[in-house]
């Protein structure tokens, strides 16, 4: 079903009201960090390549104020209606699961010598959880932003992101790359970030034209395969790089790959082919969008999906169906391009669309997806949104 968008302002207001009714006083700090979607550049990050994400108009909000208990952070989670009391001096992985993202970030600041202030906190979010839009990074980066606000310090956005990534590794046990936390921390309104995952260099592409939007289509499936296959793909990429005598697939050319094909075997060959061509597509798509060449950018998105589905083999029936439906709607129906986004085996697809046709496109996809899979998808549109920030209260 199509979800009604809750604006950041409305979400902030709700969170503030909840804070007052729950803790009996007003919050002193409110911060927000967005979820993200990757426009193109999938499974390139751990190969040292390029990714092209943007912040979405879906945020995780944390509101906080000092509390009287020493060395404690109490967090109330609005999503699950449960609370946790975190002892700042005794940090470890614990229950509930969601608290680990917060614990990990607290530990990260502590390791860097920050005295963590005691606080009562409320957490609210309209980023879908576990849907591939990085609610986890939004939570980590929001936690970092809150700690900095409360402690009266300011870390660089890169450090804030790296602390979030380490929390995800050490406290959530997810060996993620740097994209999610980087974009949640640094996202800019109306801009998409071209991130070089090796050098951490960023270049920004402006999408000022209000006639184009991004449609995020959640397949509402997540297949069990996801985490095991992720590890396998990484190993296959490493194997391909090793056979070509390089550290990272980022440095490989298609010619080098062809020369090593026999030695490599078909599986590693296909994985490497995806990564090499995806890096090229990502750079070209960024350039096309910069020049408002939307049709061209859309073609790269379709090609990316094909490559992820056939060569990298991380798509699934449901995501393939969404892309097929988008293709059928086509340019005359307002769609420039569409692809799966995120790690794969479920989660979301992203489409570049004409803003005026969003409503019609949404209806058509909902009906066709239901018909093809028997499932209901959730669709919302977003323009590139602002990264983590403090909200004036
Ligand atoms: P994704 O990052 O794609 O949304 P993950 O599995 O990486 O998926 O992270 C989802 C997990 O993050 C949730 O299961 C939950 O533990 C935690 N989480 C993130 N945001 C929130 C939130 N606002 N409230 C409660 N838990 C959250
Ligand atoms: Mg995540």
Image: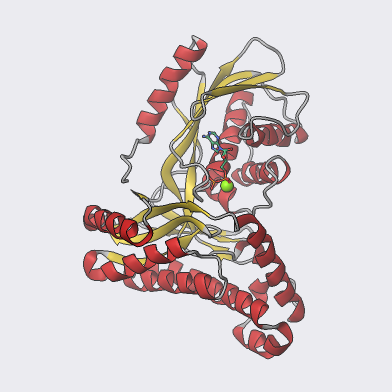
The correct choice, above or below, for 98 with respect to 36 in the image is: above
Q: Is residue 28 above or below residue 124?
A: above
Taking 390 as reference, is 44 left or right? right
Find residue 33 and report its horizontal and vertical position in percent: 50, 38
Q: Of residues 81 and 28, which is closer to you in this image?
A: 81
Please state the horizontal and vertical placement of residue 189, each as a whole percent of the image: 41, 47
Residue 198 shows in this picture: no
Q: Residue at x 50, y 42 (%)?
A: 129
Residue located at (68% from left, 11% from top) = 69
Give ligand 1's quarter of the image.
top right
Quarter holding the C terminus is: top left
Q: How many marks?
A: 0
> How far from the left and from the top, in percent, is residue 245?
77, 79
> Height in image: 303 above or below 68?
below
Q: From the viewer's perspective, is 60 left or right of 230?
A: left
Question: From where the camera sits, is residue 8 visible?
Answer: yes
Where does the image place residue 46, in percent across and percent down from the top left? Answer: 65, 62
Q: How is the image coloured?
A: secondary structure
Identify the residue at image location x=38%, y=54%.
217
Residue 376, relative to residue 78: is it above or below? below
Residue 65 in the figure: left or right of residue 319: right
The residue at the far front in this view is 374
């Amino acid at each position: 079903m199509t979800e009604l968008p809750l604006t950041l302002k409305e979400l902030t207001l709700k969170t503030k009201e909840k804070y007052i009714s729950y803790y009996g006083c007003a919050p002193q700090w409110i911060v927000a960090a967005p979820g993200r979607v990757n426009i193109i550049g999938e499974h390139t990050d751990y190969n040292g390549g390029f990714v092209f994400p943007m912040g979405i108009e879906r945020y995780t909000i944390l509101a906080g104020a000092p509390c009287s208990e020493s060395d404690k952070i109490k967090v109330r989670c609005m999503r699950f209606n449960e609370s946790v009391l975190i002892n700042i001096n005794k940090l470890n992985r614990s229950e509930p699961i969601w608290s680990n993202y917060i614990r990990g970030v607290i530990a990260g600041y502590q390791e860097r010598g920050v005295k963590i202030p005691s606080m009562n906190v409320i957490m609210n979010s309209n980023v879908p959880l576990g849907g591939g839009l990085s609610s986890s990074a939004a939570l980590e980066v929001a936690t970092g932003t809150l700690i900095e606000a409360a402690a009266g310090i300011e870390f660089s956005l890169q450090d804030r992101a790296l602390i979030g990534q380490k929390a995800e590794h050490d406290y959530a046990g997810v060996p993620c790359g740097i994209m999610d936390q980087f974009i949640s921390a640094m996202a800019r309104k109306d801009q998409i970030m071209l991130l070089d995952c090796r050098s951490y260099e960023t270049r920004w592409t402006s999408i000022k034209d209000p006639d184009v939007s991004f449609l995020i289509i959640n397949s509402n499936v997540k297949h069990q395969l996801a985490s095991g296959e992720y590890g396998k793909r990484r190993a296959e990429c490493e194997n391909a790089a090793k056979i070509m005598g390089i550290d990272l697939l980022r440095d490989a050319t298609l010619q080098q790959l062809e020369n090593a094909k026999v030695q490599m075997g078909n599986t590693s060959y296909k994985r490497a082919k995806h990564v090499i061509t995806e890096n090229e597509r990502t750079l070209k798509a960024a350039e096309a969008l910069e020049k408002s060449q939307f049709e061209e950018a859309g073609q790269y998105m379709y090609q990316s999906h094909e490559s992820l589905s056939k060569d990298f083999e991380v798509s699934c029936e449901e995501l393939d169906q969404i892309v097929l439906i988008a293709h059928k709607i086509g340019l005359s129906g307002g769609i420039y391009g569409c692809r799966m986004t995120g790690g794969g085996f479920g989660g979301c697809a992203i489409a570049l669309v004409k803003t005026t046709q969003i409503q019609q496109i949404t209806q058509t996809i909902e009906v066709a997806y239901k018909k093809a899979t028997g499932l209901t998808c959730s669709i919302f549109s977003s323009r590139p949104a602002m990264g983590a920030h403090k909200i004036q209260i």
